[in-house]
Amino acid sequence: MSLRIGDTAPDFTIPTTKGDISFHDWAGDKWVFLFSHPADFTPVCTTEMGRTSQLADEFAARNVLPLGLSTDSVEEHLKWIDDVNDTQNTDLSFPIIADIDHAVAQAYDMIHPGESETAAVRSVFIIDPNKKIRLTMTYPMSVGRNFDEILRVVDALQTGDKYKAATPADWVMGDKVIIPPSVTNQAARTQFPQGWDEVRPYLRFTKV
């Protein structure tokens, strides 16, 4: 059965390019961006690994740990990282899981037989400090991820958690948020003392 939003992310202990990790212990009190790749030394994957590395400061500012996965070995990963650094002008420092026996890929339903019997599709899991899955995205092998969207959704999740609010379509940091319909106007006056714009009784926008 595939994992769903709100599920606890399965724990695992596995080799990575930074040594063996026990996932829940390694994550600690941070958010995690767990993302899988079909194979090392493939073009789309190389650009994605490079982009994740280039955005290291952006992830760190959001208290997010990137964690890559491929079904190749640590030795292959380390050789590939040299290529990533050379071709993408970066210095990759986050760990990459060596999921040789597909244990993590199977636990997270990353193997889609319609695409490949052995290679992981481009899965994304955003996992919060309570180890709960907060977002999933799945891309086909031929399409690279949109990293602006990955950072945007982390911002939206963290903003929503902080202010007990929702975010509208195309929201980016600094835009107005939505007061959930479950919050009465009476409660909203305390929760959002800055006030709000009421388009409909169920559609109230406010700045946070």
Image (cartoon, rainbow, N blue to C red):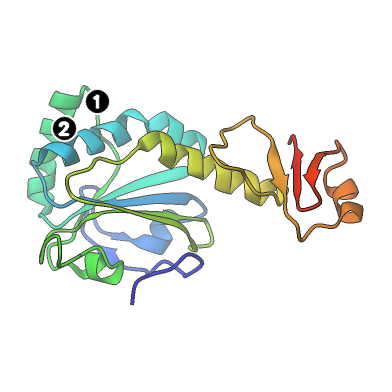
- Between 104 and 199, the one lying in front of the other is 199
- Between 49 and 121, the one lying in front of the other is 121
Q: Residue at x 28, y 37 (%)?
A: 93
Res 63 seen here:
no
- Between 75 and 61, the one lying in front of the other is 61
Position in image of residue 183 (x %, y %):
80, 57
> Against 49, is 89 above or below?
above
Reading the image, the residue beneath label 2 is 84
Numbered label attached to residue 90 = 1
Q: Amino acid at mark 1?
A: Thr
* Mark 1 or 2, nearer chain start: 2
Residue 78: name its quadrant.
top left
> Against 117, is 80 above or below?
above
Quadrant in the picture for the N terminus? bottom left
Position in image of residue 48 (x %, y %):
24, 37
> Against 125, is 53 above or below?
above
Per the model, the C-alpha gap separating discs 1 and 2 is 7 Å
